Image (cartoon, rainbow, N blue to C red):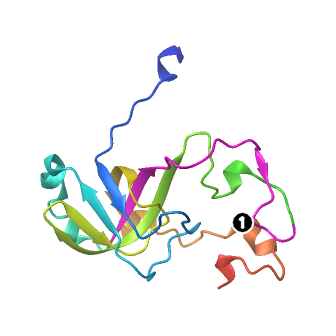
């Protein structure tokens, strides 16, 4: 298989994400964080929202335009015990392809705006796609927490 044509990929923003985060954003979504969170779609995508309000949660896929190219493929931050993990075993925003993915709750949809629960993105982040979270397909009962279970005494968000 010849991969020469697969080196360049172009994405077009379908809108942007509105959040209260200007200089600092959380590493994970905070569902009930203060401020207004919304996905503002370009008007030409309004018809694509038909029946999206029948779902409670959605996947939001976005371009991490403020992320920094990873200079390390093994990370120790923000872990207190400095345990190294591979970049792909982390949820760091600094990735080879800076694509963000969050599951958020739909609060309401008005015209081309989806009001959502908190999301871990800066204000103005380019929105790439939206997909419904479908309980039957997306909830894995045998999922685990991987290496996060090995953190003793570390106040990682998974323990809260």
Residue 53 image position (x, y, % from top left): 21, 70
**Prevalent SS, magenta region:** loop
Task: Give the x, y percent position of residue 144.
Answer: 65, 70
What residue sits 67% from the left and 49% below the top?
88
Q: Position of residue 116 (x, y in %)?
A: 33, 72
- In the image, residue 66 lies in the stretch drawn in magenta: yes
Please identify the quadrant where the C terminus is shown.
bottom right
Q: Is residue 1 left or right of residue 104?
A: right
The image shows a total of numbered marks equal to 1
Residue 157 is situated, as x and y percent measured from the top left of the image, at: 65, 77
59 drawn magenta: yes
* Front residue of this view, candidates 21 and 9: 21
Q: Few, some or many C-alpha atoms within 10 Å of disc 1 (few <14, some 14-19, many ≥20)?
A: few
On screen, residue 30 versus residue 129, left or right, reads: right
Q: Quadrant of residue 27?
A: bottom right
Report the residue at 38% width, 68% height from top: 136
Disc 1, SS: helix
Please tell me which residue is depicted at 86% across the width and 64% down the height of the picture.
Answer: 82
Q: Residue at x 56, y 40 (%)?
A: 97
The residue under label 1 is: 146
Magenta residues (range): 57-81
């Amino acid at each position: 298989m010849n991969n020469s044509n697969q080196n360049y990929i172009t994405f077009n923003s379908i809108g942007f994400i509105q959040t209260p985060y200007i200089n600092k954003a959380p590493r994970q979504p905070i569902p009930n964080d203060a401020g207004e969170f919304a996905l503002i779609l370009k008007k030409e995508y309004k018809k694509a929202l038909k029946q999206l309000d029948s779902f409670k949660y959605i996947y939001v896929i976005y371009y991490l335009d403020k992320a920094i190219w990873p200079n390390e493929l093994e990370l120790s931050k923000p872990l207190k015990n400095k345990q190294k993990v591979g970049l792909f075993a982390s949820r760091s925003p600094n990735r080879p392809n800076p694509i963000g993915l969050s599951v958020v709750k739909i609060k309401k949809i008005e015209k081309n705006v989806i009001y959502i629960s908190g999301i871990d993105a800066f204000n103005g982040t380019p929105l790439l796609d939206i997909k419904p979270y479908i309980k039957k397909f997306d909830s894995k009962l045998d999922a685990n927490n991987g290496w996060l279970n090995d953190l003793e005494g570390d106040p990682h968000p998974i323990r809260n």
